[in-house]
Image (cartoon, rainbow, N blue to C red):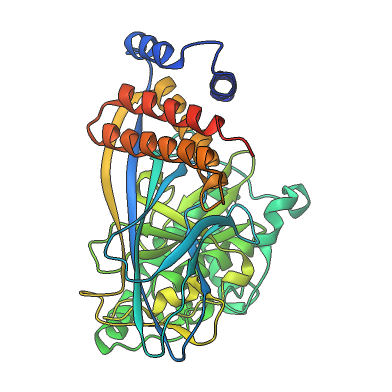
Amino acid sequence: MKRSLKCTIPLIVILLLLIPNILPISAYTEQEIKTSEFEEKKELYLMRSEHYLHINATEDVDEFNLRFVFPPDYQYQVPIYLEIHTDTTAEISNYKIQDDKNEPNKVINFTINSVEKYENIMIHFSCWVFVQNHEFDDLPKKVKFPKKSNLPQDTKTWLKSSSVVQKNRLLIKLRARQLKGLSDNLIRFAGRVAKFIKNHRFGLFLIQLSLRIFFSQDAFTTLLINGENVGRAHLACAFFRGFNVPARVLLVHNDQGFWTQMHFMVEYYCPGYGWVLIDPTFGKTPYSTKKQIINRICFPEDEEDTKRDYVYSTMRGEERWIWIDNEYIKPVYIDCNEGSKSQMFYEGNIEIDEFTADYAFLQAHLVYYQYEKYLGKDLSVHNQEYFQNALEYQTSALQEFLQSDIQAYIENMYLAYQEYLKIDE
């Protein structure tokens, strides 16, 4: 009954937003806020990932495009706004959020004007993201390992063995069998995997860290001598896939208090439930959604990441997620305490009743869909005015959220949505 209610409420809210003249939404929401104190509470978080991308031209270059990972609209998170900071030195003629080849992944596509030979330029931008916390409290205590034939077709992509997730290596299979034991409980196995990877040969990791020598971050090497968070994620995936459990690497931002906060986690597929977060570096599953922004769901072709120097003073680990369509433009890696870096910040949070939280979250989805649709488009003068009005309401909504005024946030997002609806294509 609880699950059906959760499904019904979002559908009602979507209808109310799509047909705005039926009911004054802001007044309706205010009434609900006043009468819903007895309901369950939910936490909403406003997070911001901040990036400094330095690039250099080895020859004179005309206009080119640079693409970078962007947080997808996915499960418990929705992007709200992309902010270009004023200290950006690159001459950006246009930028837009686009679909990646694998859904639901997104990229930011920056179009940059001509650059002279040996010129260094920088793009400084932030991605604002709305996150609804989920602790996976409704995850069953016991779930049997799935049969491959019973898995949803769209999850089977993450059953493959790859050059860095070697699920068929004998030592990996033996260790996975040992962790599973005689139990057929997937949830218990997930907990054992998380704890094992956190503690496994941690002393060898400390030695590599002190010597500044890291080797390939594939699952097998990580099993032998430990590794960084990406190697640990590959090892976790190998353990799961060996028992026909789809598992995939997530590229995330989390608040590590470090100069770069790109981090790798894992999701495994739980039959009858869905994808469940696990952080093998911290040895915990399920893992709260409020602790990170998901930047990319890695498909098998994304797994060829053998970064070695994330923990040092340069940013080479992020090169994997920068795509440039000109061979004469290269990423630049300088001291990250002063230059290239990537960080995540908690900007604000509100704990409110479940209905209002779901309502605000779905509002964000609908407004973001319109924002992404029109960002970077060649709009007519009056359509551009509507777009700018909507953008102002969006940014005002963010400020209201930072002041913990959920009612004002909802009203501004509603007004933003109405402005977007005025745009005629």
Q: Can you say whether 231 is above or below 138 in the image? A: below
Q: Position of residue 53 (x, y in %)?
A: 37, 71
Q: Can you say whether 204 is above or below 423 in the image? A: below
Q: Position of residue 61 (x, y in %)?
A: 49, 84
Judging depth in this view, the residue of 22 and 305 nearest the camera is: 22
Q: Position of residue 247 (x, y in %)?
A: 58, 58
Q: Position of residue 79 (x, y in %)?
A: 45, 46
In this picture, residue 282 sits left or right of residue 97: left
Question: From where the camera sits, is residue 112 visible?
Answer: yes
Name the quadrant containing residue 194: bottom left
Judging depth in this view, the residue of 411 and 129 nearest the camera is: 411
Judging depth in this view, the residue of 386 and 12 nearest the camera is: 386
In this picture, residue 112 sits left or right of residue 313: right
Judging depth in this view, the residue of 242 and 376 nearest the camera is: 376
* Quadrant the N terminus occupies: top right
Task: Identify the residue shown where x is 48% and y is 59%.
Answer: 95
Name the quadrant containing residue 98: bottom right
Farthest residue, direction right: 149
Give the number of callouts: 0
* Quadrant the C terminus occupies: top right
Question: From where the camera sits, is residue 139 visible?
Answer: no
Task: Identify the residue shown where x is 51% and y is 42%.
Answer: 381
Q: Can you say whether 318 is above or below 281 in the image? A: below
